Amino acid sequence: MKLLKTDLKNNVLQSMIQLLDENRAELLSANKKDLEAFSKDDQAMYDRLIVDDKKIDGMITSVKEVMSQNDPIGKTISHRVLDDGLDITNKTAPFGTIMIIYESRPDVTIEAAVLAFKANNKIFLKGGKEAIHSNKVLVDFWHKALNEHGLDSSYIQLLTLNRQETQEFLKNPTEQLDLIVPRGGERLIQFVKEHARCAVLVSGRGNNFLFVDDTADWEQTKKVILNAKTDKISACNALDKILIQKDVPDYDAKLKDLEAVLQAKNVSLLVDAETQKTLKDQPLIPSDDVWSEEFLALKCVIGTVDTLDDAIEKINAYSGGHSATIMTTNRENAIKFMEDVDCAAVYQNASTRFTDGGKMGVGAELAISTDKLHHRGPLGLNELVTNKYYIFGDGHIRE
């Protein structure tokens, strides 16, 4: 793939910023069509679908942030000259062509494309049909920005395929795919893994846990839980499961206090058998499968564990590998939790809602990776590269 000059890429991004700002009415009108066609039965998806002036401002900010970042391509990772004079340099390089599959969030059409383009990749955007009008307008903006600077529209393409057509595209793409990012639930991930013929980087599934140990500051704990659970239920970094250590001082009183605080925010609860001894009016989880569910709703499970090790074991057995928090004033407990819990982001005394590219300082994000190969956590500009070795010789042969 031809490497584009940094100035050219940034000029395209500057044009995109102007197009977004000057054509707000067109985008808002398109989004209105999407909203009117969508049932509000799935409140989380509906919330992700909404575009307003604040959302457009966020899109513009994302493009500006990526534009201001250093070009990630051609950076030297390592350099060495062997005894025989062979000169070996390892540099960052583009993936090539990326495909991202996602639902409902039109802002992903901006964030994914700006990252892919600045990292010198081409990208196929397979957005959900519920956002089709919004996505078409946004990709049209991208094409105008590209064409304005002498680049063709193939760098950023929108796919409007049904399930069967997507399956066929994964098996026989119109051009080589180098990386696919399915940004969604288990069914989508399994669908892509089954049919893709290239590398797949898994992202998007949350099911995040918070553990309260016997030293936790209770008022701080409630504040963190409320933020993690209720701030944005549609986000993959929202909280779903709360584990409380049995030895917490005033265990019964604190459970009832937590119950009241969550119910005041209209959060429905499920509890395990031990917790139900105190929260007698709350329904018991119907099966252990619930521990693996990501709710994306005002719904939460409260469970009781005996020890820190029990909490770690449960989180590693059931979480989505996204984010987990320990509420504790014991630094040793925090370090053990953070080292032993197998998640992309682990916290002490902080909300899981911070697992986000912008909040973690990488700017726009393609996704939150829960994979271990290549990178975990927010996929920002510097993570959308691979590497290539440049070897310079002078008639060298291996003997």
Image (cartoon, helix red, strand yellow):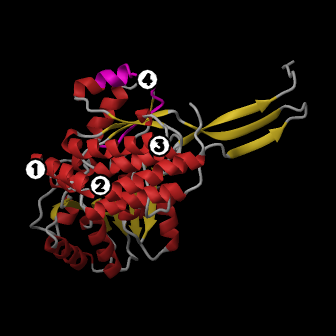
Instruction: Tell me, for residue 36, which label it has, or none.
Output: 1
* Image quarter hosting the N terminus: top right
Residue wearing tag 4:
175
- Position of 50 with respect to 108 (left or right) is left
Label 2 vs 1, first from the N-terminus: 2
Which amino acid, by three-letter code, is at mark 1?
A: Glu
Label 1 vs 3, first from the N-terminus: 1
- Position of 46 with respect to 232 (left or right) is left
Q: CA distance from mark 3 to mark 2?
A: 23 Å
Label 1 vs 4, first from the N-terminus: 1
Percent across and percent down for residue 328 are: 42, 73
Q: CA distance from mark 2 to mark 4?
A: 32 Å
Q: CA distance from mark 1 to mark 4?
A: 35 Å
Of badges 2 and 1, the one in the foreground is 2
Q: How many marks?
A: 4
Which amino acid, by three-letter code, is at mark 4?
A: Glu
Instruction: Tell me, for residue 118, which label it has, or none.
Output: none
Q: Front-most of 211 and 157?
A: 157
- The residue lying at 37 percent from left, 30 percent from top is 193
Which amino acid, by three-letter code, is at mark 2?
A: Asn
- Position of 101 with respect to 274 (left or right) is right
Quick check: can you spot residue 394? Answer: yes
